Amino acid sequence: MPLPCYERESSAVAVVGWQVGTAEEARAAVEAGCDYVVVQGVEAGGHLRGADSLDVVLAAVLDGVRVPVVAAGGIATPERVADVLGRGADGVRARDGVRPGAKRAGASAQRQTEPAAEMAGVGAETNQSE
């Protein structure tokens, strides 16, 4: 049996999520006790977790876990938000904000300094890198 990623106390209320780049990582996160997963494709910046596009990873994770799934990486327009929600994601994490008319996430001319936004709320996230 895998070790839990945290200890739950009966009086504590905590929601724990983990960022994943493969369906295998998502299953391991759920087995470790995570309440939701953040699915990231190669469109994301920073510490990439996998080698496939968000659409490919999202479909595989949705088939493999039964917890809420938040899509992340390369989501910059309202149309893309609607697309990933239509594909089954329970929420979207857009680090730089969602902007009508944006060409791609992180485009320097349109980059915003807003804090991360999670839409279609799944709850607070404990951030982790690797």
Image (cartoon, rainbow, N blue to C red):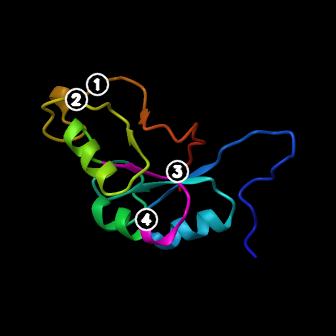
Residue 80 circle label: none
How far apart are labels 4 and 2 at the CA level?
26 Å
User: Can see residue 44?
Assistant: no
Name the residue: 24% across, 28% down: 111
Seen from the viewer's position, the closer of residues 1 and 68 is: 68
Labels 1 & 3 near each other (Cβ < 8 A): no
81 in the magenta segment: no
Give amino acid for label 2.
Arg
Instruction: Determine whether 70 is above or below 77 in the image.
Output: below
Give amino acid for label 4.
Leu
Q: The N terminus is located in which quarter?
A: bottom right
Labels 1 & 4 near each other (Cβ < 8 A): no
Residue on which the image places disc 2: 99
Seen from the viewer's position, the closer of residues 70 and 115 is: 70
Residue on which the image places disc 4: 62
Asked where in the image residue 115 lies, by quadrant, the reply is top left
Badge 4: residue crowd in 10 Å (few <14, some 14–19, many ≥20):
some
Residue on which the image places disc 1: 112
How far apart are labels 1 and 3 at the CA level?
22 Å
Name the secondary structure under disc 1. loop
Highlighted range, magenta: 61-73
